[in-house]
Image: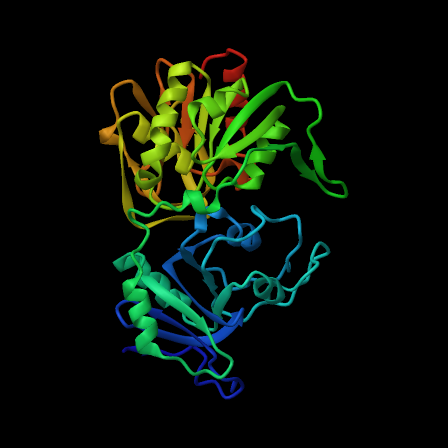
Amino acid sequence: MPEITPPDASSTDDTRPLTGVLVLADGTVFRGRGIGAVGDSVGEVCFNTSMTGYQEILTDPSYAGQIITFTFPHVGNVGTNPEDIETVTPATRGLILRADITEPSNWRATRHLDDWLKSYGLVGLAGIDTRRLTRRIRDLGAPNGVVAHSPDGVFDLDALRAKAAGWPGLEGMDLAKEVSCRQMYGWTEADWTIGKGYATQDNPTKHVVALDFGAKRNILRCLAAAGCKVTVVPADASVEDVMRHKPDGVFLSNGPGDPAATGTYAVPTIRGLMDTGVPMFGICLGHQMLALALGGRTEKMPRGHRGANHPVKDLATGKVEITSQNHGFVVVPESLPAEVEVTHVSLFDGSNEGIRLKDRPVFSVQYHPEASPGPQDSHYLFKRFVDLMEGRPLP
């Protein structure tokens, strides 16, 4: 197996033992220092180019089944806290860093990142050449791999390689049911302000039912802040389950895995909901499954879009938004029927970033408007959804 030692392995001032490895399915081994929980974890190895927000990234349910390589070197500098989370239990499989976890230096920090990782059983690796790994993913696609941490530095590399090679990968995998809620619940937490924390929406004007395919909490907060009462239902909810709440609008959430696999049960529901005429808004996986429900097609991307610096052009206004993204599948625009209008495109690779129906109050975007890059370039989409529920047409 080709082994890649840490970039600082020859340094005379760092003689710490190498207690962690990343073993790819092709046998490539990256050696470094284990962080977080002791053990090993298998998944698809991807990279994220964001400079901030590591706690939100690690708790984003859309990362289920994935090991995240952070391209920004200073991770851990703001520590962790109980507010900056997107779900109760992180679904990501692990993380990879260039440098050791930075000591926290932020007034909101309540816990060191390493301690936080251990509490959730998340395995990590630090001290490897993340530029080399990122280039490998960029050029050859996202590989399957196993990240492992052992305090004695002893690893069965053949067994780890076999585990990586035997993992089936994300294509064809329905992960939404793993991260979706098990029963319906109400959501009232709204936007955050310094010194006050999260507000409570106690005077809503509209009622939104959100299909939870792995919903980020901040999306629900943005809906609440826009004046909505939010009722969250499981991914496999039926049309009847949704409509018995008499919603003014239906939201299709983000989530992990292959949209075609989740679509086997979700697409018929989405089609039935569109037939009711209720306004509908989708984000990320919700966008992809809306496209499937309209007769379109999705496909896996070689390396995906993951970062907080992705420029997207709004074709209606000509404006460019700086967006946050996290997706490994994409809608094929040529597969969409005539009644679907493409509204947004990526300025990185020209891929589809948004659609709308010409004859019904339905629209969706591939990116994450709630994640606040820009920082508020895309918040108008939540107002657009409320406008639809109030009977105003899409612009």
Q: Position of residue 366 (x, y in %)?
A: 40, 36
In the picture, the quarter occupied by the N terminus is bottom left
User: Does residue 237 lie above or below 316 as drawn?
Assistant: below
Q: Decide if residue 358 is on the left or right side of residue 15.
A: left
Residue at the farthest top position: 391
Write the residue at 32% across / 40% down. 330
- Quadrant of the rendered structure where residue 130 is? bottom left
Q: Decide if residue 89 is on the left or right side of residue 254.
A: right
Q: Position of residue 348 (x, y in %)?
A: 34, 43
User: Does residue 194 lie above or below 357 as drawn?
Assistant: below
Q: Decide if residue 145 is on the left or right side of residue 392.
A: left
Write the residue at 43% across / 23% down. 239
In the picture, the quarter occupied by the C terminus is top left
Q: Position of residue 112 (x, y in %)?
A: 65, 64
Q: Position of residue 41 (x, y in %)?
A: 42, 65
Q: Nearer the viewer, residue 130 or 264?
A: 264
Write the residue at 29% across / 70% down. 162
- Quadrant of the rendered structure where residue 293 is? top left
- Quadrant of the rendered structure where residue 10 is? bottom left
Evaluate whether residue 353 shows in this view: no
